[in-house]
Amino acid sequence: MRALVTGAGRGLGAALVNELATRGITVIGTARRDVPTDVARSCEHIVQLDLADRLSIAAAVNELNTIGEPIDLLVNNAGLDGRSVGGGEHDRGPLEIDPNVFMRQIEVNALGPLLLSRGLVELLQAATAPRIVNVSSQLGHPEVVRRAGRDVGYNASKAALTTTSATLARDLPGVTVVAVHPGWVRTDMGGPEAALSVEESATRLVDAMLALRPEHSGQFLDVDGYPFQP
Ligand SMILES: NC(=O)c1ccc[n+]([C@@H]2O[C@H](COP(=O)([O-])OP(=O)(O)OC[C@H]3O[C@@H](n4cnc5c(N)ncnc54)[C@H](OP(=O)(O)O)[C@@H]3O)[C@@H](O)[C@H]2O)c1
């Protein structure tokens, strides 16, 4: 089995790479820059990928298609929030958001994963039971957003990723496509107060990914693979 994990250099992506490799799964990681030694050791290849740059996405798709190995599991993990593209603590709400900050999040969190996924359709369809797992967020669910979150670009981009997963699932009947909320995780994005360590989230997510069945396709799932409850 071969898995491709985006955003492999740190946070949840690095933990997913290590967890998948520990279970004997061959892993290809993508990153924008050099990755830590443990991640490099766990990966068969590291492919350079910046989801904000369509040429970079096309080049990564080309490189992976040239490698030509079937992909059983594509994990679209890489993502960002408004802070990492210049949004301040108090100007990410709907009344203040800089349009460029909003659009950058749509590009990286929603459009990029879609372009990557569709560029890899042939490699996915060459696998026996292919899966695409889009790491979305509860902060893309309207019922959760009514209570929490103040980054409208993040909310909108994750809502777009979740709904894009459902439409892709409909158009790719042979591929199981889901969106998942990984829990609130202690990473640069989640912060030190978050409930789950990266290792715990990654272990539970990998269990859920390996248990996916075609009937899950199109669903938004929690970290354990159950339908997400807002
Ligand atoms: N942490 C949480 O509590 C939480 C909750 C819900 C959902 N999520 C989602 O889980 C996923 C992983 O988040 P995390 O907590 O691990 O965040 P993180 O620690 O901030 O890591 C983000 C990852 O995404 C990569 N990335 C950012 N911009 C990119 C771009 N333009 N092109 C390619 N890669 C890019 C980063 O690469 P660089 O090192 O190059 O920046 C890094 O590997 C994200 O999709 C996030 O939205 C996280």
Image (cartoon, grey):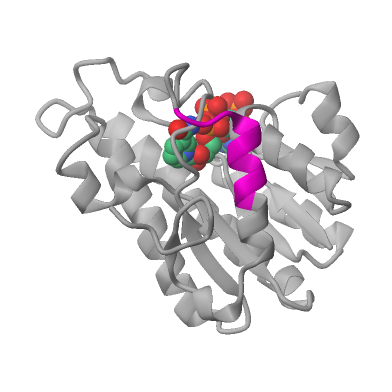
What is the magenta range? 195-205
User: From the image, which quarter does the N terminus lie in?
Assistant: bottom right
Q: Is residue 198 inside the magenta stretch? A: yes
| Residue at the extreme left | 95
Image position, residue 157 (x, y; %)? 35, 46
Image position, residue 194 (x, y; %)? 44, 25
At horizontal 30% and vertical 31% (from top left) the residue drawn is 100
Evaluate whether residue 92 shows in this view.
yes
Q: Nearer the viewer, residue 16 or 72?
A: 16
Above or below, 201 relative to 71: above
Evaluate whether residue 52 shows in this view.
no
Label tally: 0
Q: Nearer the viewer, residue 60 or 105?
A: 105
At horizontal 47% and vertical 16% (from top left) the residue drawn is 192
Left or right position of 36 against 74 = right
Above or below, 30 relative to 177: above
